[in-house]
Image (spheres, coloured by chain):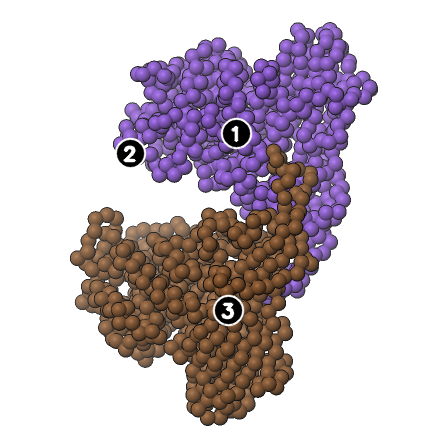
Chain colours: A brown, B purple
Amino acid sequence: MASSFNKKYTAVDFTKVKLNDPFWAPRMEINRTVTLTHQYDELVKTGRIRSFDPEWMPEGENKGRHIFYDSDVAKWIEAASYSLATHPDPGLEKKIDETVEIMRKSQLPDGYLNSWYVNVEKGKQWTNLLENHELYCAGHLIEAAVAYYKATGKRNLLDMIIRYTDHIDSVFGPEPEKKHGYCGHEEIELALVKLYRVTGEKRYLKLSQYFVDERGKKPCYFDIEAEARGVKTSEFYNKNDYEYCQAHLPVREQTRAVGHAVRAMYLYSAMADLAGELGDESLLNACNKIWQNLIYQRMYITGGIGSTHKNEGFSDDYDLPNETAYAETCANIGLVFWNHRLLQLDCDSKYADVMERALYNGVISGVSLDGKSFFYPNPLASRGDYERSEWFGCACCPPNIARLIASIGQYIYSHSECEAVVHLYAQGEGQMNVCSRNLKIKQTTNYPWEGRVKIELELDGPAEFGIRLRIPGWCRTAEIQVNNSAIDIASIMDKGYAVIKREWQSGDVIALNFPMPVERMYSHPNVRENFNCVAIQRGPVVYCIEEIDNPSGVWKMALPGNSQFSTEHKADLLGGVTVVTAEALAASDEGWEMKLYSTEPPKMVPAKLTAVPYCVWANRGKGAMRVWIPKI
Amino acid sequence: MASSFNKKYTAVDFTKVKLNDPFWAPRMEINRTVTLTHQYDELVKTGRIRSFDPEWMPEGENKGRHIFYDSDVAKWIEAASYSLATHPDPGLEKKIDETVEIMRKSQLPDGYLNSWYVNVEKGKQWTNLLENHELYCAGHLIEAAVAYYKATGKRNLLDMIIRYTDHIDSVFGPEPEKKHGYCGHEEIELALVKLYRVTGEKRYLKLSQYFVDERGKKPCYFDIEAEARGVKTSEFYNKNDYEYCQAHLPVREQTRAVGHAVRAMYLYSAMADLAGELGDESLLNACNKIWQNLIYQRMYITGGIGSTHKNEGFSDDYDLPNETAYAETCANIGLVFWNHRLLQLDCDSKYADVMERALYNGVISGVSLDGKSFFYPNPLASRGDYERSEWFGCACCPPNIARLIASIGQYIYSHSECEAVVHLYAQGEGQMNVCSRNLKIKQTTNYPWEGRVKIELELDGPAEFGIRLRIPGWCRTAEIQVNNSAIDIASIMDKGYAVIKREWQSGDVIALNFPMPVERMYSHPNVRENFNCVAIQRGPVVYCIEEIDNPSGVWKMALPGNSQFSTEHKADLLGGVTVVTAEALAASDEGWEMKLYSTEPPKMVPAKLTAVPYCVWANRGKGAMRVWIPKI
């Protein structure tokens, strides 16, 4: 591990990546043209922006405010900034600037900035880090400020937030006179690393490190602050022994993915960031132990994570109920964040496989094709009454998916001094610097619907370097040609990537072929909900059956083991998807009038099974759905 | 329907029935010697008896009291009375008498008696019928009083409760000056019929009829009383449109089993009682419509009913989740109450089949073999963390199962002027009067473990009459001999009963044979949770597989369609049960290290499946369990 840990890659920024593929490009367009406006309107309508204005004092509970409203506004600014970075839009920029000026009204002279504590619980700052999301909101403000500054060069938000961060830095830290706490909802840790990267100010990196290192130490700060408020730590937290917020143990002693899944992902992402920035192998080792537990025991096939509503997070190993799956959109996005960071530290395709699985399935399912409604949980089965919502009281997911989509380009390529890396395949191009050469990688492909990828290189001069091409984990028979000559892949594989090192020059063409048969997927036998069931996967895309396509009833169908799959790409269906069909069997009601139990099994009759990508389910009205299908 | 409705039967009282069978007799003995004492101790310990004493005023919330405590005490008195009726016990009688005297302390001069309203919410009687269980508690007090009077002839409790009932009768009724309400939790309706039967006072019958007839009329009384209190009816009730307490429609217009399952069963039982007492066919018709919905669409194979925790009751047709099944012990007992009443009105074996299914499975599962712990919900699958509890804050189930077991004898026989009816088979004897003769029916059988039943008759003189013998719905090849001569059953069947009409005399022997092969049971294809699964049933007994007997893991096993069952009676296991075994297959973990999903299915390896009766599960420590087993 040590050797690969030293070899760091840098993700190619989304501003250097253009996509015109059939999957992401339409989503980005809808995100930019519809979703961002829709969400801004919701922020305005629900008072989330006005919350920052002390003069806005509506009647009613909490003066119209909520402890985590700031984060919703911040995440939207971040998403809008990513959009601005690739699609300048003075109108959108004006909305952000106006919002920044309203936010400024909640900044105190010492730099402190929080719409809740400045306007509702005045004077009670930093007294309930466990429950009140104060540093969490700060973290999202930091991410927003960094994003807006990078997109526009404007320092209005950045300077305001630097003042706030400096204030936070004066309050928290190892010095005896400071508070030795950290947030109940992780987020600021990874945000501080971003702020450090953009400002070069090491204090922010140190503060992030402090928050991460302090977490889980005994006596627990959450008990100390509760005592100071004269209360007991809530029963909820006691029962969970702080696993809920990953504060049950120092982070380096943690070995399982536990508690609230979004909090977990944000913490683990910060751990990966710090591991890279500080060369701290102990943090990477902890990440890897937790990763193994999460990926081999606690992740849905859709890349959804956090199986239970109870704690919005993890339950037990192999406890992956389908219908009641939580698999919160934010958590699934967090899984992408974390694996993307790990991939820069250790270019192992196992991380990219997870990232790809989540992106094409349990992440993008979080938003409707029209960009106006969102899933909070992403279940793998539905009785038919579950739909996306236009907004939520706790609205973390909508702007999270918006910022992910707006910056999706950054997940595709990495580079190091003498290597270019292709993690994901999607038509478009990416620009990076390798061996002091400007390299443009141009992909021509219909991925994820087809597995052929043509890569053309543009270079401002020949150079010898490596191109590291991910062989997707789902592919068993990859083929590569360079300038029409076949490559022996086996001999050049390194951690799931084919590494082609040679002198490259402009016009070189790499042809990849990842055949995409429809695959029957099976679960570990410990996953009781999927026993005797199959899921359908083709390439990176996990399928489901929806009632609208399967009038026999999705709960009555079974897939025979010898049934052949057919595929057909339907350009006019669900934004253009490849549909999978198979001859299946469906239980008939015949003979079951006035009978609920019988010694005779239901008659199974032929039925055509039609499966569509999971990520686009529930885009055609209400209806039942399932991913795991009984086999027969 | 009209013709059969006129033909009424009377259940043979449990005091006329003796059991020495292997199934019920040991349960009755434990109930009498252990459970009743255990529950009395809990009643004392938790303040439920002292609640009636105005001088007992502990510190803390609600002065140590609860709105439904009275019903727990009453149900225990009822259970203890049934025990006294067959096993006189001066010590137990003294406990009841002492309890009655404490209860008397909460009776007001006008007869009103309720520990909550007399000692906590003084002066607020009858202001929240919807939520506060006031008439429900009164109903249980009435049932207790009737039972204690019938068991001992003592009028101490009866007279006290008659005063209370007369007070209730002065408060509620159709007269303009009275309140036109009814209870949110049905119970008093059936209790008033019992009081009418023991006192002959028609006012009680009329009051019961009033409560039943008034239910569901518009405008709804619950809205009226809420308005009088200056509140809106709770959101919970509005959302459910009063289905929760079966007040969404006048009872005769109801066609589906809805809402809180215990409330539903108590209402439907009262409807059946009133149908019989008043010859009101419209009530019986309503019962039958609801019955069809419940039995053909909403009942677990165990006779458990009310599938969801959300409303402790019914959800949608065919929505019968196993692991999260509520199937409250009280509801399952209520199903027995209702079907037993219907059986007296219309001697159709479909009612007895339901009664038997519930009794041998989802009812008796409610109590541990040692008689000291109880299930509230009775799920059909468990991940292994669910166990019986010694008591509950809401302790309706423990005394309910105690009173059911103490009076189990009454479910076995009925009689009419010229007919004797055997509904259930269990070794022992029952005495009844038929055609002015004293008839004793003596059953010799090892039921439910064996299907052979020898019935011997004792008569104080020969007489011609019919003996109506239920052919269990689970039996497909019944045989009957009378004095060693085979009977052609088909020619004498009437609604699931074989009716043998002839001149009977002492010493006549009827030999019944109900072969009990192990059967694979299947669910209606609309029950999505049981798709492609089988349950094991033998005779009336539904089986389950428990982890302790199936080390391969109950979630990993599948039963091949061609696998043969074996049975063995194990006298020393779980109080003596017949165990079912079969060759099955279990998914192996082999090859699944560091893997959660795969294109290769888990290897299925031979495994012995061992099933035990569902009703005795969770008597050997914690462990996983399931009733429905995947077929392969």
Tell me: A40 left or right of A579: left
| Cα–Cα gap, marks 2 and 1 | 33 Å
> What amino acid is at disc 1?
Ile
Which numbered dot is residue A52?
Answer: none
In the image, which disc is placed on residue B290? 1
- Residue B323 percent location from the top left of the image: 55, 45
Amino acid under label 3?
Glu
Kindly identify which chain the residue marked by label 3 belongs to. A
Query: How far across and how far down the image is residue A555, in percent?
Result: 57, 48
In the rendered structure, the residue with mark 2 lies on which chain?
B
Q: Nearer the viewer, residue B13 or A255?
A: B13
Give x and y (percent) for residue A187: 37, 65
User: Callout 3: helix, strand or loop?
Assistant: helix
Hey, which quadrant is residue A128 in on the image?
bottom left
From the viewer's side, name the closer residue of B420 and B138: B420
Label 3 packing within 10 angstroms: few (<14), some (14-19), many (20+): many
In 3D space, how far apart are the residues under numbered discs 3 and 1 (Cα atoms)? 51 Å
Residue at image position (35%, 78%) is: A197
Which chain is home to disc 1?
B
Q: Which callout, 2 or 1, points to the residue nearer the camera?
A: 1
Secondary element at tag 1: helix
For marks 2 and 1 on the same chain, the one whose residue lies earlier in the sequence: 2
Q: Which residue is depicted at the point 52% across and 71% down?
A: A447
The residue singled out by tag 2 in the image is: B231
Which residue is labeled 3 in the image? A356
